[in-house]
Image: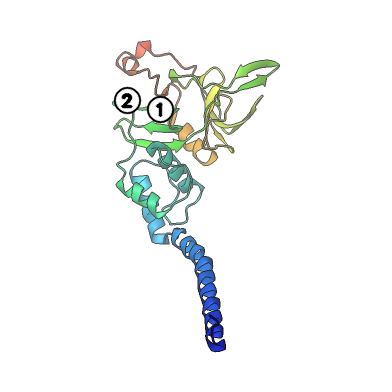
Amino acid sequence: MKLPSGLRVCNHLTGILLLLVASVCLISTPLTLTAQEKPQPLTRQEKKEAERRLSDIGYRTGPVDGLLDPASQSALVAFQKWEGRAITGQLTLDELNAIRASSGPHARETGYEHVEVDLDRQVLLLINENDGVRVFPVSTGSGQPFIDEGQQSVAYTPRGRFIVYEKVMGWEKGPLGSLYYPNYISGGVAIHGSRNVPIQPVSHGCIRLPVFAAREVSKALTLGTIVLVYDKLSFVSAKDWVKNPKLKPTADIE
């Protein structure tokens, strides 16, 4: 049946309107979702709260000022490593809530002053005589082969119990790069500052610290300090060294 001309025009206009409405919906929906998914930036007060809480539970931050300097960002990375969270270095509301709920890190062995390096978490813990801890992110041996003085070696950080037997103040130039305030614990393996401390293991075997923390850690690591290096499959206690100091290796004090 042939429709009157007025009805044909009306149906045509209705179809155009429906197409326009559908187009608007298709265009606007993704924009709305994007806006909803974008995290809201934290206030300076919330950032200060995160810094203060991180410092209180054992992470080495910078000044508690809400500005998130490299030291505070490093503390956030150490927190994320310890808690097994995604290592983003970004402070979001979700991270702030996790920081609020955390009870903080703890030493594997207690009762005496020493250092622990947790290779699984890639963190270093300074432990005082009262079992208080200060935690720093590190990067240790990558496990990859490399060439040193014409010989092939493997980038391996040794596990076990050690003592700091030699120290150098300031920068030391080595065959594989520069070390800042190195503290030697085994052969050429040292705990030292580096300008390159990524979240994953990349070193030739040394235990790399952020440069800003190297002097502070070196000051705490006097000659003879016990250092425990372990992963989930290996841990060696040093309590017998503490009970009987004659069993403990000696550092060459000059």
Residue at disc 1, secondary structure: strand
Residue 196 on image: x %, y %: 58, 37
- Mark 1 or mark 2, which is nearer the start of the sequence? 2
Residue 26 on image: x %, y %: 52, 66
- Residue type at mark 2? Glu
Residue that numbered label 2 is attached to: 109
| Viewer-side residue, 144 vs 43 | 144
Seen at 44% across and 37% down, the residue is 136
Instruction: Tell me which corner region of the image, top left, top right, bottom left or bottom right, holds residue 49.
Output: bottom left
Residue 77's disc number: none
State if disc 1 and disc 2 touch (CB < 8 Å).
yes
Instruction: Tell me which corner region of the image, top left, top right, bottom left or bottom right, holds residue 178.
Output: top right
Mark 1 residue crowding within 10 angstroms, few (<14) / some (14–19) / many (20+): many
Residue reaching furthest front?
A: 1
Seen at 41% across and 56% down, the residue is 47
Residue reaching furthest right?
A: 150
Residue that numbered label 1 is attached to: 116
Reply above or below: 103 against 251.
below
Residue 185 on image: x %, y %: 49, 21
Residue 96 on image: x %, y %: 37, 51
- Residue type at mark 1? Glu
Q: Is residue 130 left or right of residue 26?
A: left
Cα distance in 3D space between marks 2 and 1: 9 Å
Residue at disc 2, secondary structure: loop
Mark 2 residue crowding within 10 angstroms, few (<14) / some (14–19) / many (20+): some
Reply above or below: 172 against 12.
above
Seen at 47% across and 22% down, the residue is 164
Can residue 225 be seen in the rendering of this structure?
no
| Viewer-side residue, 37 vs 154 | 37
